[in-house]
Amino acid sequence: MIKRKLINKKAKKEIEKYPLVVIKWYDITSDSTWQSIDDLTNAKLPICTTKGHLLSHNKGIARVFSDYALKDEKTGVIDEIANTTIIPTSVIIDIKKI
């Protein structure tokens, strides 16, 4: 699993601070249809995959963004981010740096 220290705070361009990662995590599901107790007992949680830049991984939460806009192409300073995902670390199976 990726550690907080792998977020590169000495990067020359801001985007280089945030490693590109793949996160595998368990999703919560619900079902309002009628089913047997055996069906529910044997049900499995779906495993989801999120890819993006790891903004932070602390205090029980991983924060990821996929898109970003720069204030200035030369300086590489990020103006805004989009396509964000917040995942509780309790459901994370694995985080791998790409």
Image: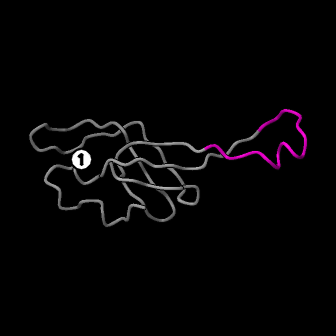
Residue 51 position within the rendered picture, expressed as x and y whole percent measured from the top left: 41, 42
Q: Nearer the viewer, residue 77 or 44?
A: 44
Who's the residue at 76% across and 45% down the image? 43
Who's the residue at 50% across and 49% down the image? 24
Q: Nearer the viewer, residue 22 or 88?
A: 22
Residue that protrudes farthest toward the top in the picture: 33
Task: Please state, as top left, top right, bottom left or bottom right, where the N terminus lies in the image.
Answer: bottom left
Q: Residues within 10 Å of mark 1 (few under 14, many from 20)?
A: some
Q: Nearer the viewer, residue 46 or 81?
A: 46
Relative horizontal placement of residue 31, taking residue 57 as reference (left or right)? right
In the rendered image, residue 28 lying in the magenta stretch gets the answer no
Query: What secondary structure is the magenta-colored segment mainly?
Result: loop
The picture quadrant where one finds residue 4 is bottom left
Q: How is the image coloured?
A: one colour
Residue 49 position within the rendered picture, expressed as x and y whole percent measured from the top left: 50, 42
Residue 55 position within the rendered picture, expressed as x and y whole percent measured from the top left: 36, 52
Helix, strand or loop under label 1: helix
Who's the residue at 14% across and 38% down the image? 72
Relative horizontal placement of residue 34, taking residue 91 as reference (left or right)? right
Relative horizontal placement of residue 4, taking residue 15 as reference (left or right)? right
Q: Is residue 47 above or below residue 73?
A: below
Who's the residue at 63% across and 43% down the image? 46
Magenta-tinted stretch: 31-46
Number of numbered discs: 1
- The amino acid at mark 1 is Ile
* Residue matched to label 1: 15
In the rendered image, residue 39 lying in the magenta stretch gets the answer yes
Residue 36 position within the rendered picture, expressed as x and y whole percent measured from the top left: 90, 41
Q: Is residue 66 above or below residue 58?
A: above
Relative horizontal placement of residue 37, taking residue 94 as reference (left or right)? right
